[in-house]
Image (cartoon, rainbow, N blue to C red):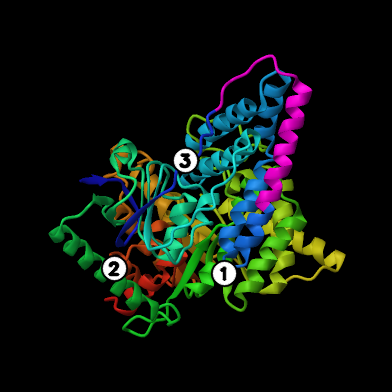
Amino acid sequence: MLIKGVGASPGAAIAHIYFIKQLDLSVQKQEGKDPKAETERYEKAKEQALKELDELFEKTAAADPAAAQVFDIHKMMLDDPDFCDGVEAALGAGLNAEYAVKSSADALADFLGSLENEVMRGRAADVRDVSGRLIRILKGIQESSEMPAEDVIVLAEDLLPSQTVKLDRSKVLGFVTKRGSVTSHSVILAKTMGIPCIVGVGEDFDQLPRSGEIAIDGKTGEVLVSPSDNERADFLRRVNIFMQMKEDLKKYRDVIAVTPNGRKVKVCANIGGVADADTATGFGADGIGLFRSEFLYLESTGFPSEEKQFEAYKSVLERLAPKPVVIRTLDLGSDKQAPYFDIPEEENPALGYRAIRICLKEPHIFRTQLRALLRASVYGKLQVMFPMITHLGQVLEIKNFVAEIKAELDAEGIPYSRDIEFGIMVETPAAAVMSDELAKEVDFFSIGTNDLTQYTMAADRMNAKIRDIFNPADPAVLRFIEMTAKNAHANGIWVGICGESAADTTLTDFFMSVGIDELSVSPASIPAVKKAVLSSKE
């Protein structure tokens, strides 16, 4: 039997099935309950959940700090105002604690799942994980401690973070899930481990057996049950090719990427959190080309303080020093919404109140971040990048803010680096067209190909019906990239790419031909990109 899902992490594997059974977390709605008694039950369950999450964090952090970070996120979710308000309202209405948790979590998960941003959709799984833990405790169900004893391919309806980290990674050769997204924690883990993963199998998942042998291809999304001898031979060939490719790429992790013509190109990492810095260095990153600072805001229950931001930026800079770290300032809005930040609903949020537009209109938010960034700059090589720039006036206004913050810190006797580079993202056609003027006012450009493609082609990148139009390799997009690179170099500044197409090795030759100085990609893609640069045809 052959079925297909969404290939989320490339590679092939053949192994026995390890099926993770879903606990019975079904909930019945019960009315007329004593609000005080149910609230006490809920609070005790919450205390137990926090204790379990602390234990999971300590156990996981020893082996994988990046994976452990998710449990800090889960702890914050237990205090998320949207979640807590829903629970309290249901308890106050006389509903049982199990139903109060489920109804509030379902509402929040459905909201996150409806967003365009893949990362935020992936957070819906975290909400379900947290609520499932509370419901399990309320129902008195013990967690399973069973672990695979042989090499396996894991099958689960939806592999939650708390389930993923408990697996013996030395025994897991791949993942297959009924639901899930390409940014779920199981996928992130699979990419980090370099193993195949298939998500979104859908209703066909129910046809899969609970035991026996299975073969998967994480690139094509194929799932083959009980392969015949010929089919098995074909998949073994794919496995060997994949393993040889993995082994071959290892030698590129720590090499310097130099084109055949002798031009050095930095291959850096895109990260979304402090713990990701260790993953980046493990894959041989030449620095951080994009630190998405908005995740500090998305993972908080309120605006993160200057001190909290300072500690996060300082930590990443210290871990990477003396390599450069590009930190992008707040990029909320559009499909990235923080519940505590009341951004009015917009008919077209991708063209609305977002990113630098928010920062310049609400300077108290911007100033807090700039102070934290400048204070952290003494701990490494900081480069600050501003997103969603469309005209020169924005850049000049930003420079005034930076000058004011520097004056404040000087007056307070607080040190900061005098060598910080300030750059902008070129992710709008307007910025590309005006790149000759913009280049005179900044230290670098970083081209965000995701939005640049969306705006250039007038094609929503999340709309599957027009996926053929959303093409990062379209000549119109490539012309904007070439124009931007030419204007950057004419004005003596460097230019990088931090969008998804930076990892597309079919475009590496083009990027090298127009003089791109830096490619910033997901950490696991670094070795392949370095290899492509070394063999590029300028």
Relative to the observer, which residue lies in front, 321 or 300?
300
Secondary structure, mark 3, is loop
Q: Position of residue 475 (x, y in %)?
A: 27, 55
Which residue in the structure is indicated by mark 2? 242
**What's the residue type where badge 3 is placed?**
Gln
Which SS does the magenta portion mostly show?
Answer: helix
Relative to 30, residue 19 above or below: below
Which residue in the structure is indicated by mark 3? 22
Is residue 236 highlighted in magenta? no
Q: Nearer the viewer, mark 1 or mark 2?
A: 2
Residue at x 86%, y 64% (from the top left corner): 412
| Mark 3 vs 2, N-terminal side | 3
| Residue 373 disc label | none
Instruction: Please give the range of residues in magenta.
Output: 27-53
Q: Nearer the viewer, mark 3 or mark 2?
A: 3
**What's the residue type where badge 1 is placed?**
Asp
Is residue 47 highlighted in magenta? yes
- In three-dimensional space, the C-alpha distance between marks 1 and 2, rounded to whole angstroms, equals 25 Å
Secondary structure, mark 2, is helix
In the rendered view, does 425 fall on the left or right side of 257?
Answer: right
Residue that protrudes farthest toward the right in the picture: 412
Q: Nearer the viewer, mark 3 or mark 1?
A: 3
Q: Quadrant of residue 524?
A: bottom left
| Residue 278 disc label | 1
In the rendered view, does 150 fall on the left or right side of 25?
Answer: left
Q: Position of residue 286 (x, y in %)?
A: 50, 75
Please rate how many residues cluster around mark 3, counting C-alpha atoms within 10 Å: few if below 14, some from 14 to 19, many from 20.
few
Relative to 291, residue 22 above or below: above
